[in-house]
Amino acid sequence: MNGLGWIDLSVLVLYGAVLVGMGWYFVRKSNTAEGFMVASRGLPSWAVGLAIMSAYTSSISYIATPGKAYDTNWHPIIFALTIPPITWLACKYVVPYYRRMKLVSVYSFLEDRLGGWARFYGSLSFLLYMVGRSAVILYLASMLMSTFVPVPIEYLILILGAITIIYTLLGGMEAVVWTDVMQSAIMVGGGLFCAGFLGWHVLSGPEPLISQAVEAGKFSWGDLSFSLESRTIWVMIIYGVTENLRNLIADQNYVQKYAAASSEKEATRSLWISAAIYVPMTALFLFLGTTLFAFYSGEANTLADSITKGDQVFPYFIVNEIPTGLKGLIIAAIIAAAMSTVDSALNCSATVTMLDVYKKYFKPDISDKAAVFVLRFTTVIWGVLGTGFALLMIRAKSALDTWWQISGIFGGGILGLFLLALLSRRIKTWQGIIAIASSILVISWGTFIRGEAWWQCSIEEILVGAVGTGVMLLTALGFSLAGGKESGALK
């Protein structure tokens, strides 16, 4: 691939400088614990909505979604279409309750409904998941960048990690949200430009190239068979419902953002804004993948022999087809998708560490000044850990695949715990441990022991987390119905 010119590199350097500058600008608004964690609960719905939308996207989705459409079809759109009904449920029942409780850490809800053991497991799982997620995003974004600039991937990981740590450390949630607003604009603008460029090439002419994508079934959403062993429409619906329930009910990344809105009305509006943007954004990314297939199906445009899978096509297109200057902006959009995920992970990890670990177990009467110090210190710690693990992934041949497998174990049972809490059922500590263990065993079986034999798992891999959630919930409900107590309905 061709390298970047000085104009494109200047755009990237300027972008990094602006991020650090925004962090510095918001220092004064993050000098209290509430200011650092939830921006003093004063953010407008449109800004929070864009930040929540950014939590859905990353450099993975910016590259992987067009790549998936290039390789297969439009089945990822089903995931996006399950967001509106889940958003309605969250706005109707969950957001009002969380706002009345003035939640900052969503895992305190688990303690209130189920007990301290649930809060400990939920917060620990989240922290482990966030370290791995930050590492994956930094590694993939840097690996992508290394195809554009002649800089070793190790240095790129350190640079991206350092910039993200600095502006998140300085500005707290205020910086996270407002940089996400800027990054969202860059992401959307970059995607629209590429879609317009590709659309003009494949939709025009007496024999438009898009016809080849139509003939290849690239606009299909999948088949309607009831098999759970492939990505049918039903499998994608189940996956979308469970994953979006986990996001909007049980994931600190999302809850902490709408906790930062200025009112309950603004919080619910922010969720609807994020859904209204994310659904067409997904369609935009899928359109990019489909039009890339059509574009490179023409005789005038050929891929290099080194391009062997869909994930590589969009970066190849950017380097070879996008004009100088705009190329830098498009690459900045991809980096923006990465950083908007990592900055949120760092801020939320620091918040959970301070509230669910330090304040709960070590210093219940911590002063506000000391709390801010802990928040900033742990932001650095989690950022360094994420960057360090990203560096380790360079030398691990299957690090990425292994991480996604382990992440299912970390996060698989969390949704089950929250659903149990929302159903107003309380169980004993030992019963909760058994329920969690059963979920982890099932997820491990579905992740590592795969095949067609009767004792092996043949269920589509993206459903393994949903199956683990169901097992945990059924196990816990069984204990609860056998002698547990209700913890009171949501009011």
Image (cartoon, grey):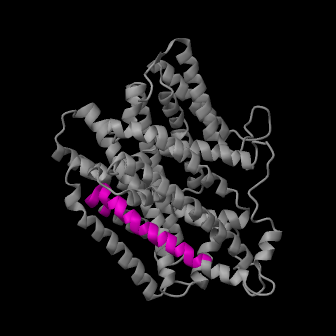
Locate residue 112, reporting x and y percent: 37, 27
The secondary structure that dominates the magenta segment is: helix
Classify residue 104 as left or right of residue 337: left
At x 43%, y 54%, the residue is 270
Locate residue 34, reporting x and y percent: 25, 47
Relative to 205, residue 161 above or below = above
Look at the image and tell me in which quarter the C terminus lies: top left
The furthest residue to the front: 265
Q: Is residue 194 magenta?
A: yes
At x 61%, y 84%, the residue is 321
Quadrant position of residue 117:
top left
Q: Which segment did they paint magenta?
A: 167-195
Quadrant position of residue 215:
bottom right
The furthest residue to the right: 215
Q: Is residue 264 magenta?
A: no
At x 59%, y 45%, the residue is 405
Observer-nearest residue: 325 or 448? 325
Relative to 223, residue 125 above or below = above
Look at the image and tell me in which quarter the N terminus lies: bottom right
The furthest residue to the top: 483
Relative to 161, residue 345 above or below = above
Quadrant position of residue 111:
top left
Q: Is residue 106 visible?
A: no
Locate residue 135, reporting x and y percent: 46, 56
Classify residue 99 as left or right of residue 271: left
Classify residue 138 as left or right of residue 221: left
The number of numbered discs placed on residues in the rendered structure image is 0
Observer-nearest residue: 158 or 95? 95
Locate residue 192, reporting x and y percent: 56, 75
At x 58%, y 66%, the residue is 63
Relative to 358, residue 85 above or below = below
